[in-house]
Image: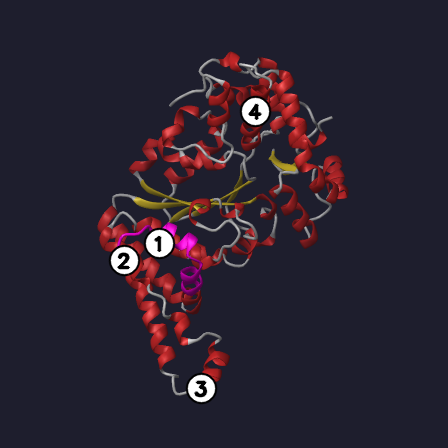
């Protein structure tokens, strides 16, 4: 994989919007080895189709760890056929429904098997036709009655799903086609139990005909928690997803970890801290973050050592923020006509990033001050959960784990 050999390369290679995959594996520094070793061992030992929840904050590196899970543990692929559903790749980031998730779970499993893919599309087409037949039975009624009783006109269901049969990418089509999305959601909601049964039938065929009982199916569902207003999926609809008959790893929002919804579930926390709860720096963890920076550099002297350490400390252990600080520092160095990134460039980049947080942090001043002092909210009542969700989603605070979950302010907010 190409490493950065100039300021321009640094600006482009350090991209906070992408997670690492197989073709960028050389950049990967395994800061979560203990966690992924534990995950691997649980799956190796398990004889059942279990679900493991992973609670972590957006940007902490869990997506890259999961993307590379199968390649980092090749022996696991002898036992499991691993499929990954990346929510941010296939769903609208502002709008998600459990119907969307059920649809894409089925599709990512069968998309490379023409026979089963056709069967899946046929299920959708059959649902559409049956709904049309139901509506046609009431054509004797007046239009007003039809709209009143069904809240939908006949024409509203005359959606042509034929486009899905001619080879277009179903995932991309569904993400951008709001009309298709609306109709298919309604169809799935009307017959959710039947649709679940159909999905499980197709999964059973996949296991029987493709895997031939030689492997088990493992589905990794990642990034749903990064979609705006997605909490309802985990609080209201998680039992629907759990009815999918295969082993599952599901990432979830950290602020819901202590909610009653997840009592009794196997939910693991993942975080990377640079300080203890008492505020003492952890030098070996700072070194791991500077190693992440170095892994993308052809020449480590492109970023001064003291600059790398300041980047690591101000990342708060959040890898997306780490990468963003490097990128913004490269921009400062470029404007200064410099061929390397200095401590001065990093300090300026951090101060500019602080301004981006200023209005949001002022709005939550009292809550943030309480977190800074107590490392946790006052309670986990709905109002506190709401504030915790906002603060973690907007990276005003970072979540950590050390036998218990605790929180601290994003270091950039407190930068002078």
Q: In which quarter of the image is residue 405?
A: top right
Residue 106, disc: 1
- Asked if marks 1 and 4 touch (Cβ < 8 Å), the reply is no
Q: Which residue is identified by label 4?
A: 331
- From what the image shows, is residue 289 above or below residue 205? above
Q: Position of residue 297 (x, y in %)?
A: 47, 18
Label 2 – label 3 distance at C-alpha: 35 Å
Q: Where is residue 370 in the image (x, y as percent from the top left)?
A: 75, 40
Q: Which residue is identified by label 3?
A: 142
Q: Where is residue 55 in the image (x, y as percent from the top left)?
A: 54, 42
Q: Label 4: state its secondary structure.
A: helix
Question: Mark 1 or 3, which is nearer the eye?
Answer: 3
Label 1 – label 3 distance at C-alpha: 39 Å
Residue placed most toward the observer, 402 or 167: 167
Q: Position of residue 353 (x, y in %)?
A: 64, 31
Query: Which residues fall within the magenta stretch?
Result: 165-185
- Neighbourhood count class around disc 2 (C-alpha, 10 Å): few under 14, some 14–19, many 20 upward: some
Q: Which residue is identified by label 2?
A: 165
- Neighbourhood count class around disc 4 (C-alpha, 10 Å): few under 14, some 14–19, many 20 upward: many
Q: Main secondary structure of the magenta part?
A: helix
**Residue lying at 33% horizontally and 73% vertically, measured from the top left:** 130
Q: In which quarter of the image is residue 115?
A: bottom left
- Asked if marks 2 and 1 touch (Cβ < 8 Å), the reply is no
Specify whether residue 354 is in view: yes
């Amino acid at each position: 994989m190409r490493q950065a050999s100039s300021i321009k390369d640094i600006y482009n290679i350090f991209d906070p919007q992408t997670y690492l995959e197989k073709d960028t594996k050389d950049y990967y520094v395994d800061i979560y080895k203990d966690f992924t070793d534990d995950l691997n061992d649980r799956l190796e030992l398990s004889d059942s189709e279990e679900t493991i929840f992973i609670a972590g904050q957006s940007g902490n590196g869990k997506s890259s760890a999961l993307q590379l899970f199968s390649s980092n543990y090749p022996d696991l692929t002898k036992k499991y056929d691993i499929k990954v559903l990346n929510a941010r790749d296939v769903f609208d980031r502002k709008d998600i429904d459990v119907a969307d998730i059920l649809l894409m779970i089925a599709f990512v499993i069968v998309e490379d098997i023409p026979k089963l893919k056709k069967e899946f599309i046929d299920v959708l087409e059959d649902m559409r036709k049956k709904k049309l037949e139901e509506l046609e039975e009431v054509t004797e009624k007046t239009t007003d009655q039809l709209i009143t009783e069904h809240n939908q006109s006949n024409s509203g269901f005359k959606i042509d799903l034929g486009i899905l049969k001619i080879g277009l990418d179903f995932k991309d089509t569904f993400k951008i086609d709001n009309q298709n999305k609306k109709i298919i959601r309604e169809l799935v909601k009307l017959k959710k139990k039947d649709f679940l049964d159909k999905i499980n039938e197709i999964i059973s065929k996949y296991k029987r005909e493709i895997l031939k009982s030689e492997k088990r199916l493992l589905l990794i569902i990642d990034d749903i928690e990064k979609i705006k207003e997605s909490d309802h999926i985990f609080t209201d609809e998680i039992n629907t997803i759990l009815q999918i008959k295969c082993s599952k790893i599901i990432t979830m929002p950290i602020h819901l970890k202590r909610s009653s919804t997840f009592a009794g579930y196997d939910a693991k926390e993942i975080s990377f801290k640079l300080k203890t709860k008492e505020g003492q720096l952890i030098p070996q963890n700072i070194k791991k973050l500077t190693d992440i920076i170095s892994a993308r550099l052809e020449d480590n002297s492109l970023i001064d050592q003291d600059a790398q350490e300041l980047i690591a400390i101000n990342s708060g252990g959040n890898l997306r923020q780490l990468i963003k600080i490097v990128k913004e520092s490269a921009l400062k160095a470029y404007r200064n006509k410099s061929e390397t990134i200095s401590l001065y460039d990093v300090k300026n980049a951090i101060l500019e990033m602080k301004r981006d947080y200023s209005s949001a942090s002022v709005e939550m001043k009292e809550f943030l001050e309480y977190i800074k002092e107590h490392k946790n909210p006052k309670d986990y009542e709905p109002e506190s959960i709401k504030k915790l969700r906002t603060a973690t989603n907007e990276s005003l605070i970072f979540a950590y784990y050390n036998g218990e979950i605790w929180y601290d302010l994003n270091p950039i907010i407190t930068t002078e």
